[in-house]
Amino acid sequence: LKGPNASKQCEKLKLDIYKKAIGPNGPQGGVDAEDLINAFAEQARRRSTCPSKQNGGNLGVFGPGEMVPEFDTVAFKEQVGIIHGPVETQFGSHLILVTDRK
């Protein structure tokens, strides 16, 4: 997201994604990975300003050094399976869901 309130909007969006992924039964059993990915993709298609919105925010496979440093740090050093962010880059505020690392 871009703009003066992008970071706050990302925080709210992250909560909305988790609420959708958790569903009406609450978080007792945790969050199903597929449900989280689907909820993330739905919001990315709706709200993202990145060209990846067409793919539900999926950037595909990329290696270290192919993205801006702030993004790389999260993609290659932070926990897999949770939403990180907002991550601030020169392109705006981002939510990042690392689904796999090879």
Image (cartoon, rainbow, N blue to C red):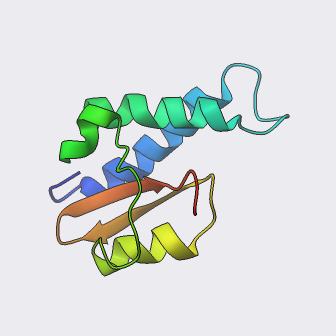
- Is the residue 87 above or below the residue 18 in the image? below
Tell me which residue sits at (56%, 76%) in the image. 77
- Is the residue 68 above or below the residue 9 in the image? below
In this rendering, position of residue 22 left or right of residue 44: right
State which quarter of the image contains the C terminus: bottom right
Residue 92, image x, y percentages: 21, 62
Q: Nearer the viewer, residue 5 or 33?
A: 33
In this rendering, position of residue 61 left or right of residue 28: left
- For the image, the number of numbered tags is 0
Can residue 49 be spotted in the picture?
A: no
Picture quadrant of residue 53: top left
In this rendering, position of residue 68 left or right of residue 10: left
Tell me which residue sits at (33%, 57%) in the image. 94
Can residue 14 be spotted in the picture?
A: yes
Tell me which residue sits at (67%, 30%) in the image. 22
Residue 23, image x, y percentages: 66, 23
In the displayed orientation, state which residue is furthest to the top.
24
Residue 29, image x, y percentages: 84, 34
- Is the residue 80 above or below the residue 21 in the image? below
Tell me which residue sits at (17%, 59%) in the image. 4
Residue 25, image x, y percentages: 77, 21
